[in-house]
């Protein structure tokens, strides 16, 4: 996101933001700010034990019940616009449509919420969005980059062909197209429809055909390219973990040209470790920018690196030093650096900006930071990261009104709220948080808190949880209101112990009688947890 609207959508009701002078009721989005005895922020949602859970429900309920149709169509606004102005809701943004950010982020938010609740309606919502993008936003077969997804288009375009207000006709961001390819494959894993696998293979094969040697000024794929002509319009980008996961998924499922995909996978890994991990130039500019630089910095790229390493520490032999360094990188570049007059912190909460040319503090970037801090706390045991996560995530809950309408940047003037950021990227971070700190999930309820892989056939009852793991080498994190008596995978009981050569689970008692359960398996199939 780079647009700053001329209309002010939201105002923080306070002129003096210093903690010393908060002697009167201050509000964010009509919520009175609640401080604890240390004068640090806690959520406005009561009771505190369900605050994050209710935040997630509020955002999805808003999508289900409160989004008007885009003018002149029978489709919701989010099909054809990037966002909205909070003070003039129902009049969608005229800036652009960030297809390549919205599709992957909404899918991730939906599949995690589905696993957490068993609510299939969110998957139906996302299926309609993905199907439309595939049908109306894929390049023709005679293009230089053929059968490849458009990542951006003009607001109101019913056919997606590029964001011509700032970029060129048929110009795309290759990293976001790779993210869409991963989404297509994951759609295939969930729905089983071959069209999604075919679309994913098209993306992978085009990427494989265009891979190149990377350097400090030229990444393994160009950041931006014109799909029709093949002209490169920006040489360097660093947001390649979606591409990595696409090829990784295809290899694991033995789908497509696996030998070639292995070659590409190694090129991606080497580039990331040799360049952005060392230089700190995590470059991308999001779908509405014309960034052409090998030194530009974006928190999204660095955050995606953090989250992938937290799920897959074997990617990098220096993971345990790189993760805290990346968190520090975010703090130095996007917490401490601020727009004039905006705070770096609010009542103990670090607030996070987006990219070098756009520093307003954003709900979804702050949630990304909170997720990384929480998960590093779970690994390191360093309580300071738990505290950082807690305060920043509490601040994020204020970026909602009570109906679930998101206010993306409540300390900034003139920033629109984007569908992708607020309803995709932001909420999906909370499942990472729950996995790291299951105490922050609601008590006396059963939930799958997080899994990197796709789950389906999720069902909950009072003393049983069922689901199907669609991939091998999976890990699921749960909070349960009952002590498991047996956990089976494809009818075979799992052992309750750590083993490198077997499927197993672990159980930890929580303070209020609930249990945190982690299941690790090397086979896919049906999992049943019974009490």
Image (tube, rainbow, N blue to C red):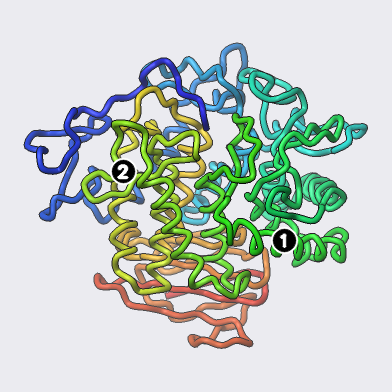
Instruction: Write down the quadrant of residue 156 in the picture.
Output: top right
In primary-sequence order, the first of circles 2 and 1 is 1
Label 2 SS: loop
- Number of residues whose C-alpha sits closer than 10 Å to that of mark 1, classed few (under 14), some (14–19) or many (20 or more): some
Image location (x, y in percent) of residue 320: 49, 73
Q: Nearer the viewer, residue 327 or 356?
A: 356
Q: Is residue 358 left or right of residue 169?
A: left
At a point 47% along the width and 34% down the height, the residue shown is 358
State the residue at coordinates (76%, 65%).
266
Tell me the residue that label 2 is attached to: 344
Q: Nearer the viewer, residue 454 or 289?
A: 289
Q: Residue furthest right?
A: 142
For the point 63% across and 87% down, the residue is 501
Question: Is residue 408 depicted above or below 41 in this figure?
Answer: above
Instruction: Identify the residue at image location x=79%, y=60%.
Output: 264
Which quadrant: the C terminus? bottom left
In the rendered structure, find residue 249 and report the number of the disc placed on it.
Answer: 1
Whole-percent x and y of residue 469?
62, 65
Q: Nearer the viewer, residue 472 or 223?
A: 223
Please identify the quarter of the rendering in which residue 500 is found. bottom right
């Amino acid at each position: 996101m780079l647009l700053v609207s001329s209309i002010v959508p939201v105002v923080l009701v306070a002129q003096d933001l210093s903690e010393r002078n908060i002697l009167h009721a201050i509000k964010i989005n009509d919520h009175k700010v609640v401080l604890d005895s240390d004068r640090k922020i806690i959520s406005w949602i009561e009771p505190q034990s369900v605050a994050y859970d209710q935040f997630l429900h509020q955002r999805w309920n808003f999508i289900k019940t409160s989004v008007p149709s885009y003018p002149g169509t029978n489709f919701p606004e989010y099909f054809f616009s990037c966002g909205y102005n909070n003070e003039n809701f129902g009049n969608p943004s005229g800036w652009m449509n960030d297809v390549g950010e919205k599709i992957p982020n909404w899918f991730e938010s939906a599949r995690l919420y589905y696993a957490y609740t068993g609510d299939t309606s969110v998957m139906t919502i996302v299926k309609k969005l993905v199907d439309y993008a595939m049908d109306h936003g894929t390049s023709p077969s005679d293009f230089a980059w053929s059968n490849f997804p458009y990542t951006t288009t003009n607001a109101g375009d019913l056919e997606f062909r590029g964001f011509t207000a700032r970029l060129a006709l048929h110009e795309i961001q290759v990293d976001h197209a790779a993210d869409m390819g991963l989404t297509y494959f994951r759609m295939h894993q969930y729905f089983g429809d071959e069209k999604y696998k075919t679309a994913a293979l098209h993306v992978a094969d085009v990427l494989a055909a265009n891979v190149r040697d990377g350097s400090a000024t030229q990444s393994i794929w160009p950041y931006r390219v014109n799909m029709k002509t093949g002209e490169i319009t920006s040489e360097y980008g660093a947001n390649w973990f979606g591409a990595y996961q696409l090829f990784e998924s295809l290899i694991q499922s033995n789908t497509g040209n696996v030998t070639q995909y292995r070659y590409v996978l190694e090129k991606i890994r080497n580039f990331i470790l040799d360049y952005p991990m060392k230089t700190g130039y995590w470059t991308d500019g999001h779908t509405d920018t014309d960034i052409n630089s090998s030194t530009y910095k974006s928190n999204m790229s660095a955050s995606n690196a953090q989250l992938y390493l937290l799920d897959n520490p074997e990617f990098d032999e220096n993971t345990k030093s790189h993760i805290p360094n990346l968190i520090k990188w975010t703090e130095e570049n996007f917490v401490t650096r601020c727009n004039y007059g905006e705070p770096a912190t609010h009542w103990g909460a670090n607030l996070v900006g987006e990219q070098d040319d756009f520093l307003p503090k954003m709900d979804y970037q702050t949630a990304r930071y909170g997720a990384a801090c929480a998960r590093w706390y779970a690994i390191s045991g360093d309580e300071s990261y738990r505290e950082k996560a807690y305060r920043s995530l509490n601040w994020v809950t204020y970026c909602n009104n009570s109906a679930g309408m998101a206010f993306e940047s409540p300390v900034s003037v003139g920033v629109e709220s984007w569908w992708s950021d607020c309803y995709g990227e932001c909420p999906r971070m909370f499942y990472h948080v729950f996995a790291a700190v299951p105490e922050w999930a609601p008590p006396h309820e059963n939930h799958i808190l997080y899994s990197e892989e796709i789950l389906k056939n999720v069902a909950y009852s009072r003393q049983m949880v069922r689901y199907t793991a669609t991939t091998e080498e999976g890990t699921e994190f749960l909070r349960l209101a009952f002590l498991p008596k047996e956990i089976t995978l494809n009818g075979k009981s799992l052992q309750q112990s750590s083993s490198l050569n077997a499927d197993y689970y672990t159980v930890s008692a929580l303070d209020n009688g609930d249990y945190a359960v982690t299941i690790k398996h090397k086979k896919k199939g049906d999992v049943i947890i019974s009490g």
